[in-house]
Image: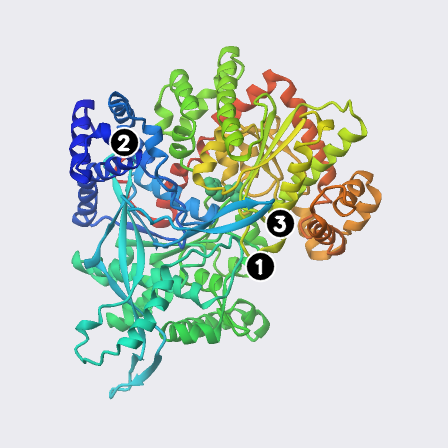
Amino acid sequence: MIITKEQFKKDFEKKMLKLYAQEVEDSTVHMQYFTLGYLMKEYISEGWAKTTNRYTKYGEKQVYYFSIEFLLGRLLASNLLNLGIRNTVSDALKDMGLSLKEIEDVEVDPGLGNGGLGRLAACFMDSMASSGIPGNGNGIRYKYGLFQQKIVDGYQVELPENWLRDDNVWEIRKSDKAVKVKFYGDAWMKPREDGSLEPIHTDYQEVLAVPYDTALVGYENKTVNTLRLWNAEVPNYTDDIQGELNFNKVLLNKREIESISEVLYPDDSHHEGRVLRLKQEYFFVSAGLQSIVAQHKDAGHPLSELHNYVAVHINDTHPAVAIPELMRILMDEEGMEWAEAWHITQNTMSYTNHTIMSEALEKWQIDLFKELLPRIYLIIGEIDRRFREILSSKFGEDQNQIEKMAIISGGYVRMAHLCIHGTHSVNGVAKLHTELLKSQELRDFYMLYPYKFNNKTNGITHRRWLMLANPELSDLLDETIGNSWRRNPQDLKLFKKYKRDPEIQKKVEQIKRNNKEKLAAYIKEKNGIIVDPNSIFDVHVKRLHAYKRQLLNALHILHQYHEILENPNFEMLPKTYIFAAKAAPGYYFAKEIIKFINALAEQINNDPRVEDRIKIVFLENYSVTLAEQIIPASEVSEQISTTTKEASGTSNMKFMMNGAVTLATLDGANVEILEEVGHPNIVIFGMTEKEVLNYYRNGGYNSREIYESDARVKRVLDSLTNGFIKGIQVEGQDIFKNLIDYNDEFFVLKDFDSYVAAQKKMEDLYRDRFTWNKMSIENISSSGVFSSDVTVMQYASGVWDTRIIER
Ligand SMILES: *Cc1c(COP(=O)(O)O)cnc(C)c1O
């Protein structure tokens, strides 16, 4: 959009008067935020209505991205950026004596996700709008987002994240678009006179799903897509014509109903089989599909062609009930026959797999499922029956094989199997991950449906993670290679030719230095720790999980500490180790690792013998907003998961784009980062995929042997339990047990030696400023393929078959 400073000032002043009956000069920053936010929504609304109408009018095929999480991050800055008015607004506010940065800091970060999966959904929303793909998000409007983390005495404490306590300026409640979702009751098939069967569902509980829409503004184009999040409410029983109002019952139900959209489950990569979670899943899926079908009919399109107008994407298995729910709508409500409904459903739906870890695979107890969703269970039963027929025709009487692949088996409904059978596309999120799906975890399904399997390597939006997070680097890119990279991120490769240019190298180094100073100031303010911006900033930020191996990093730091104590003249470049991570509240071991890191920090940071060669900082409450501050200031990117365990990772891409050098195992998208930058520009260590798979399959790993044969490992582990590190009596014992008595499931000790060597190599590279700056530039300029703009275009052409409206 185009607006002059003068016009904006007028609009802003007028809006402030209207909202607060107040002049700008007397306003608080809080008022300024809401004034600017509501004004922005007005600026967006015309384009939003136009986009929606255009999709309908021209019958564009639309994508609906179904995800139980959307980890958006703050929207004011990104909306200003994408509208193309951020500089004008910033200047105009400055003229009025106001600071855009301060105003932006008022916004609460809507934390409606745990980590990578929810953030991916958010990056895709930004990239779809910016690439002109007709795309919508569909999810839950949680009243409480992911808990806020406080660190108290080194321990994680969780506080509720009441992100809606003030107005949310970005959402619009659409009461007229509310739909009803049915739970519980009895469902059966009643024979009709002609012998056919009629589906009956009685005595159900009705929940009102009310949509709240948020605009998704495309980058300097005309597209404004929609994110629709559903709120669970009590239906208005006063229009119950039967007059059997039972107010007590209604009030008792109120709490139960509202709890559906009350709080996000705080588990990442772990499936918890609670009924409330299944309620959440069916709630947003049913509401979303009902509104999609209603819209399709309103537009006058025949239902038999739904899949030509609509693509529904299932982000991990949480929305898997979309498959039987669309069958239900098409058959029970629209009177379609099974065969046609199944054809449409399969061709409408596509599925992304996000993990191969068995504890994350969703399976629901039959009894629980049947009680909550009786009609959906009947439909899944029929899907399973027909699937077993296909399997029989393939495998004959091999009952074992059939049970292994069935959808309902062993007392459970298996959501991944439902997704593979019920969709036309199954994709992994990085090359290695997709290969593992095909050759290991989903091998049988790959044999059955080879044509469904494909890879779509994850991506990140370069608008949030480069343009907004690192404005100085963005300006330098404009000055050197022009600004085409903003629209076509793959043009970042033009920057490669400056990798040996001393002047540009110096500028890149200076920008990193400035970002480090800002982060150092933040660390001082939050943690009271003074860190030296000349030290190497080595950063490990992501969810706390054993497979992500924050423990390996911490044990190496402890090892370095021992080296310093043993040899006071121990030579090393000063290092600042930065951690940030939330642990699931019930994940005891992960919380113990947080305590361990904090105890280590307390001791090392305050030991004069260390002479500031090592500082450890644990920043609390990791979130999108915090990530935006940390990543541009990072030099070493810790991506050290146990090989085969990290499906893709996306923070690895964010770091690279900001010029950090990756210290990595050959896991997830690290493999593709290596392909892009080449061996000289990344440091790889650790077990290969083959070694890991071999140990998991055939056993033979014995962590105690390493403990007994490697003196460094022994010294480090003994200091966990002998009181050397203060304040971790319990945690130290438990970590020791996990690594030795329980044989170190994630090969921390197995990889210890090569990690120490890799850390040393990293340090040597850093000493040589020319080499390091060159590596940094190589990483920045190779990061364009990891823009989610590239990823969503691949989905659009390879999976969704949607047209690109504008570029
Ligand atoms: C990108 C991101 C993640 C994902 O990080 P990984 O290292 O890929 O697990 C998690 N949380 C936040 C806030 C992020 O921005």
Q: Nearer the viewer, mark 1 or mark 3?
A: 3
User: Residue flagged by tag 1: what amino acid is it?
Assistant: Ser
* Residue under label 3: 546
Q: Nearer the viewer, residue 333 or 141?
A: 141
Location of residue 125 by image quarter: top left
Q: Which mark is residue 199?
A: none
Whether disc 3's CB lies below 8 Å from ligand 1 is answered no
Q: Secondary structure at mark 3?
A: helix
**Disc 2, ligand 1: is the CB inside 8 Å?**
no
Q: Is mark 1 within 8 Å of ligand 1?
A: no
Question: What secondary structure is marked by label 2?
Answer: loop
- Give the mark nearest the N terminus, 1 or 3: 1
**Relative depth, front residue between 451 and 27:** 27
Q: Please report whichever mark, 2 or 3, sits nearer to the chain's N-terminal start.
A: 2
Which mark is on residue 358? 1
Drawn side of residue 654 relative to residue 61, left or right: right
Q: Residues within 10 Å of mark 3 (few under 14, many from 20)?
A: some
- Residue 732 vertical placement versus 711 (above, below): below
Q: Are marks 2 and 3 in contact (CB under 8 Å)?
A: no
Direction from residue 731 to residue 452 in the image, left or right? left
Marks 1 and 2, how far apart in space? Answer: 43 Å
**Tag of residue 220:** 2
- The residue type indicated by label 2 comes to Glu
Q: Is residue 399 left or right of residue 498?
A: right
Q: Are marks 1 and 3 in contact (CB under 8 Å)?
A: no
Q: Amino acid at mark 3?
A: Ala
User: Does residue 382 appear in the picture of this structure?
Assistant: no
- Alpha carbons under labels 1 and 3: distance apart: 14 Å
